[in-house]
Image: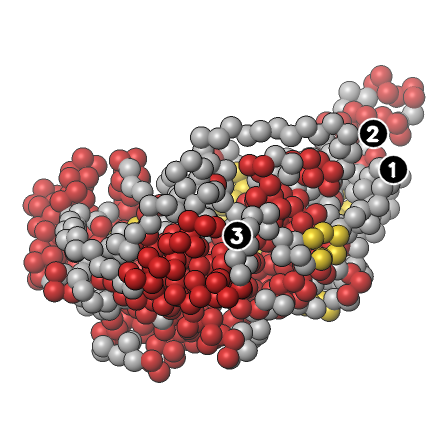
Amino acid sequence: MTRMLSKTFIQFFVAFSLLDVATVHLVNGADFKTTIEPFLKSHCVRCHGLEKQQGDRRFDRLSLDFTNQENGEQLQEILDQLNLGEMPPEDEPQPSAARVRQVVQQLTALLHKARETARAHSGRVVLRRLNRTEYFNTVRDLFDLNMTDFDPTIAFPVDGSVEGFDNIGEGLLTSNFLLAQYLEAAEQIVDKAIRPGPRPKMVHLVSRGDEIHGGGILDPRGFKRALVRDQFTRAFVKRKFNGVDDDGEYILRVKTNTVRWQGHRFDVDELGYDPNETPRIRVLVVSRSLGAVATRVLGEFDIRDGDPVELEIHGYLQQGYEFAVEWANGPRGSQKRIMRKVFPKYLPQDTIPLARNPVEMYLGAAPELRLHRLELEGPYYPQWPLPGFTRFFSDIPSDPGVEYLRKSLTRFASRAFRRPVERERLEPYVQLAMGRFSETRDFWAAVKFAMRAMLASPSFLYLIEPAKSPLESNVLASLSNYELASRLSYFLWSSMPDDELSRVAAAGDLRKPDVIKREIERMLNDSKSEAFEQNFTGQWLNLRKLGEMPPDPESNKSYYADNLEAAMRQETRLLFQHLLRQNLNILRFIDADFTFLNPALARHYGLEELPGDDFRRVRLKPEQHRAGLLGHGSVLTLTSNGVETQPVVRGVWVLENLLGTPPSPPPPDVQPVEPDIRGATTIRELLAKHRTIATCNECHRKIDPIGLALENFDHLGRYRSRYKKHSMIDASATLPDGSEIVGVEGIRSYLLARPQQFTRCLTEKLLTYATGRRLAFTDRDDIDRIVEHSAASGYKLRDLVQAIVASRSFQTK
């Protein structure tokens, strides 16, 4: 069957025709020859010419053939460097201000006209595969599936990343292995979603006392005891139980209490728990078929000494999964060690040789968790058949035939392919289903077979925006309403359009400015926009790399005990979420005088103790040095290596993600040169030695000052004024343009003095993520307009998203 569906998959691949290459267009050739070209020869070609190509750039072969976008890209880069004052380098002969102004004006005009030429012959990516996150979310929304503990993408290969984003078309390659995984995933998905027939029967399992399966001691009175148990010893409702038979909502009821939580005579340090805490049990979801692996924690629940408490916990279980109970904060360590090493200390010396099992002798002395009853009941469903089933199969006739099959598959295909489906496009799937029905005489087996083929087809797996026709080759082709709906939904939700967005697209109204603005607001207010908040911040700010180089567990115990990695990531995501939902100024990313902390992260930062366990907004004081992203532990930790800070990595991070001026990577054919660091005792001295190498200095003079200004933060983002060897930290630096900065406050001031540069950087990141392609110099006019609009409207984040969607770059192919 896999081979058959693979063949079907190939048969449905779309083909793209190549655009004819037009004749060369020359724009303002006289200006180029008389002003720009002589300027390049005088100030650029010596370092970027035939003999030398610093930064892997060569400008001696530039022409005005803008059907070759590389010429436009390079001229745009030259213009950007001149506008930033980065070029020519300070140690090279400097042109007069008047000459630079003339070149900038002519380049600006030249490139404005050149973009119109290049757009007509652009080779933009028009075919983009769903990445793993988008695939997962699309399946969830297509079938209204509960995906808890079910991930059909688990075996998919990692998506390729381009410019930091994993939703860029050219990085999303397809392989035979991935095609095979698509087929397997489609089978799993359809089997879970298409569940005809009666509601599954209820399960009601009750275990009391010694019937409960798991670690612990059997009390003669008939209930289960967990005596100084290892916290990872788990109790299950039944010994012979391979998880539930049907996906659904289940209830776990637990009757439990503790005994002698405080009133015992053992040393609590040796038992390894805190008797001042309220005793708690932990309820998990596990799969014994996977080796009793816990997939998630449903929660922790307070219990007590004395009369048992009865708890009722609700949770979703996939087929084959079950609940488990463990003592969350009971005595720690190996049960065997406690039994053999701790208990005998409290036995009379003359009885030790006789105590083959000291547990039996101390069965009434140590702290105990007692599980009197475990009860499992379910599955419960808010409706049956499930909504993801009735969406495509309603009013089922007693003897469904070909017409009902075609009607149902049409309904499914229109949702799965995210646009109306013509009869001729649907017919191959109908024929697949009819062929399977002829073999099996099973209507639902035939339906599932066709639906699996649809889920493995390019129409589902790709965001297809057909290439421009020859008649459109000299104009910008707008996306259709359906294409625009998909681009918008995968931007803001990382998933398919919902019913409302599809309805607006079907009515042909989505291109109306007031309508699309209203839809953006609706979508940003929907909980599914959390995908945008998480995925964009994870990639723009490199948060996904947090944890790739974790600190040593032995010397950084609180980092792991307090789960600081997750807390740091959440702090940054919550700042983005707050600015987006409140439509606040994007410059708050630089200098926000508030942040979002839980008690553990506040403790890590050395701030005032916070009550409770949850994240809350916290007002920051200037002397705490935590304002904006550069005070976040996430950024400071991911730009370190788990042992020490990395000023170069931190400098590159700021240049790339806040200033939008990433340094060029070292040429691949150049071997790294080790500087002579004899006599260098600090990181500042080491970097100064490194800059004495000519091939390194050009980039490091921009990178190192910013990284050194952040040295007051250690490798886990804690603020410090001294190194471990007690030498004071010098966080002062001089940038290439002569600006003096001191510490993180100096970097913030530098950034705030250049609001449009940061806005341009964020705009480019957002537009890249939104369109799923690299930006080209042909997008520059749109970016300029968005930046100008943002400045005029107060640099508000939600308004910036609106401007991105309204741009020509977003709404055209």
Residue 99 seen in the figure: yes
Q: Nearer the viewer, residue 136 or 722?
A: 722
Q: For numbered disc 2, what is the local secondary structure?
A: helix
Residue located 60% across and 59% down the image: 572
Q: Residue furthest bottom?
A: 514
User: Position of 262 compared to 649: left or right?
Assistant: right
Q: CA distance from mark 3 to mark 1?
A: 73 Å
* Position of residue 346 measured from the top left corner of the image (x, y, whole percent): 89, 30
Q: Are marks 1 and 2 in contact (CB under 8 Å)?
A: yes
* Position of residue 630 measured from the top left corner of the image (x, y, whole percent): 66, 57
Q: Are marks 3 and 2 in contact (CB under 8 Å)?
A: no
Q: Amino acid at mark 3?
A: Pro
Q: Which residue is mark 3?
A: 88
Q: For numbered disc 3, what is the local secondary structure?
A: loop
Mark 3 crowdedness (10 Å alpha carbons): few <14, some 14-19, many ≥20:
some
Mark 2 crowdedness (10 Å alpha carbons): few <14, some 14-19, many ≥20:
some
Q: Nearer the viewer, residue 497 or 734?
A: 734
Mark 1 crowdedness (10 Å alpha carbons): few <14, some 14-19, many ≥20:
few
Q: CA distance from mark 1 to mark 2?
A: 9 Å
Q: Which residue is mark 1?
A: 267
Circle number at residue 342: 2
Q: Residue furthest right?
A: 349
